[in-house]
Amino acid sequence: MSREIKVPQLGESVSEATVAKWLKKPGEAVALDEPLVELETDKVTLEVNSPAAGSLSEIIAEEGADVEVGAVLAVLAEGAAGTAAAPKKDAPKKEEPKKAETPKAAAPAPAAAPSAPAPSLGAGYPLAPSVRRLVDEHHLDPNTIPATGKNGRLTKGDVLKYVASGGEGVVAPSVPDRGPREERVKMTRLRRSIAARLKEAQNTAAMLTTFNEVDMTSVMNARKQYQDAFVKKNGIKLGFMSFFAKACVTALKELPAVNGSIEGDEIVYKNYYDIGVAVGTPTGLVVPVVRDCDLKDLAAIEADISGYGMKARDGKLTMAEMTGGTFTISNGGTYGSMMSTPILNAPQSAVLGMHNIVQRAMVMPDGSIQARPMMYLALSYDHRIIDGREAVTFLVRVKQCLEDPARMLYDV
């Protein structure tokens, strides 16, 4: 009995995917629920599993093909042995054994034609180091250079004279094979989606970026002081991102426009705080969303971020996990970025950019100069909904919460 393998429902507002990779070949046996093929949508890569045990008898949609929901991907032969379903034309032909042949006597190799005695090396004398260096530098064949030394030795003067006279026999330096000068690779569906969304954000929003810097001493001291106890209690490390998420929630509550969005001619103010965390993967940038950050403690936020990071690397994020965010944090510092202007994640109206932490000489309130761990912060925002005053105030509030985390505890 044969069964068609079809493209399943891909998620809300997603109707098309690209066949990324077949995990089985025609003729191979498959088990119930065993992954058959990977499909790539605008945001995620998902696996289509076998609905029954059997063998893959035919692939309809090859790798790279664009397919819609309900399209036939392949045909499964239920209950059939794997090798039985393989096309006969692919079976290797059985070769008949060749008859043994009586070995013929090997013909004697033709005698080498006598050649004139080589003028360079004389009676097989090795080259002097200085001569060898010149020969190598000019890529010369020493056997082609007339030798005038004792017993037919090649001298340094012989080589210099040969080079000066433009002698023949110079061996051109070998050029390594670098392959084709250009290579064209079709963009993945995820990369096309990223390109379209980012360009749409540039074309639609009145995007502007404001900057500030934050002294990370307090956060770093807190992590150092409580890390062991935090791991022992929660089974996960205390990172920087949970502090930033909490600081952003504090600032978003005070400046609701930064947590809002524009829909038509209306401004939508959101009274929930779903923070997107940008994660770089081999296939592109994805932004899973940590829900209700205002209701979660540091441990719950860190657990969500860690789980999303592992799923992102494995391509296991779902559409639901990457939709509905109200604000985004992007940490370019993990790659060594000192400063950047992050781009909006539409339809959101703002995104915070984190950067690397660098020890810099800072003038303290008492006039002393100290080396402090400093980080540049960047807030890109949609000027249609967020005024400059609000953007700057937001960034200052985030700075205050990070430099004195107790503010978030006492809500001051």
Image (cartoon, rainbow, N blue to C red):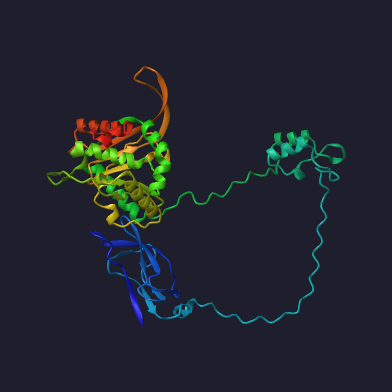
- Quadrant that contains the N terminus: bottom left
Q: Where residue 199 sits: x, y (%)?
A: 28, 45
| Quadrant assignment, res 125 | top right
Q: In the rendered image, is residue 381 in sight? A: no
Q: Which of 221 and 118 is in front in this view?
A: 221
367 relative to 386 in the view: left or right: right
127 relative to 55 in the view: left or right: right
Q: Nearer the viewer, residue 100 or 79?
A: 79
99 relative to 183 in the view: left or right: right
Q: Which of 185 and 113 is in front in this view?
A: 185
Q: Where residue 333 sits: x, y (%)?
A: 39, 38
| Quadrant assignment, res 363 | top left
Q: In the rendered image, is residue 3 in sight? A: yes
Considering only vertical position in the picture, is 387 above or below 198?
above
Residue drawn at x 62%, y 82% as measured from the top left: 96
- Residue at the right extreme of this rendering: 151
Considering only vertical position in the picture, is 265 above or below 208?
below
- Quadrant that contains the C terminus: top left
Residue drawn at x 46%, y 50% as measured from the top left: 182
- Residue at the top extreme of this rendering: 367
Q: Where residue 117 sits: x, y (%)?
A: 83, 48
Q: How many labels does the image show?
A: 0
Residue drawn at x 87%, y 40% as measured from the top left: 151
